[in-house]
Amino acid sequence: MKLVFAAFLICLVLSSSFVETTMAGSAFCDSKCEVRCSKAGVKDRCLKYCKLCCNKCQCVPSGTYGHKDECPCYRDLKNSKGQSKCP
């Protein structure tokens, strides 16, 4: 019983540290998304979705608009309505 409890605690600690590092974002994504969203009308929403897409795809197209062919994963992510998820 103690072994199961200890294993549970270890899993809990490891998973919480993993969540913190993925939620924190990376310097790469932060800087790329800052450029990508620099001219956005709703900058905070643009940054949110850009960082989600960047963390998943590990790339962000250059410029502030278009150029999605540079990153097929980023281009192909869709929301529930079938529209592009990534700015």
Image (tube, rainbow, N blue to C red):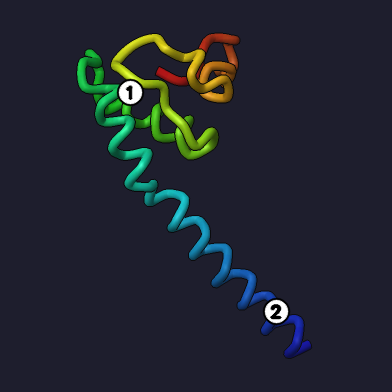
Number of labels in the image equals 2
Would you place residue 5 above or below residue 40 in this image? below
Would you place residue 67 above or below residue 55 in this image? above
Q: Nearer the viewer, residue 50 or 82?
A: 50
Q: Can you name the residue that lies furthest to the right here? A: 1
Q: Which residue is mark 2?
A: 7
Position in image of residue 36 (x %, y %): 30, 23
Position in image of residue 65 (x %, y %): 34, 11
Residue at 48% over, 30% down: 53
Calculate the distance from the C-alpha at mark 1 to the C-alpha at mark 2: 40 Å
Q: Where, quadrant-wise, is the C terminus in this rendering?
A: top left
Say whether residue 16 is left or right of residue 9.
left
Q: Secondary structure at mark 2?
A: helix
Q: Nearer the viewer, residue 4 or 34?
A: 34
Corner quadrant of residue 30: top left
Position in image of residue 40 (x %, y %): 24, 16
Q: Which mark is residue 75?
A: none
Structural crowding at the residue carrying mark 1, measured as other residues with C-alpha within 10 Å and reported as few (<14), some (14–19) or many (≥20):
some
Residue at 41% over, 21% down: 61
Q: Which residue is mark 1?
A: 46
Would you place residue 61 above or below residue 52 in this image? above
Position in image of residue 55 (x %, y %): 48, 39
Residue at 42% over, 27% down: 60
Amino acid of disc 1: Cys
Q: Which of labels 1 and 2 is toward the front? A: 1
Amino acid of disc 2: Ala
Q: Nearer the viewer, residue 8 or 70?
A: 70
Q: Secondary structure at mark 1?
A: helix
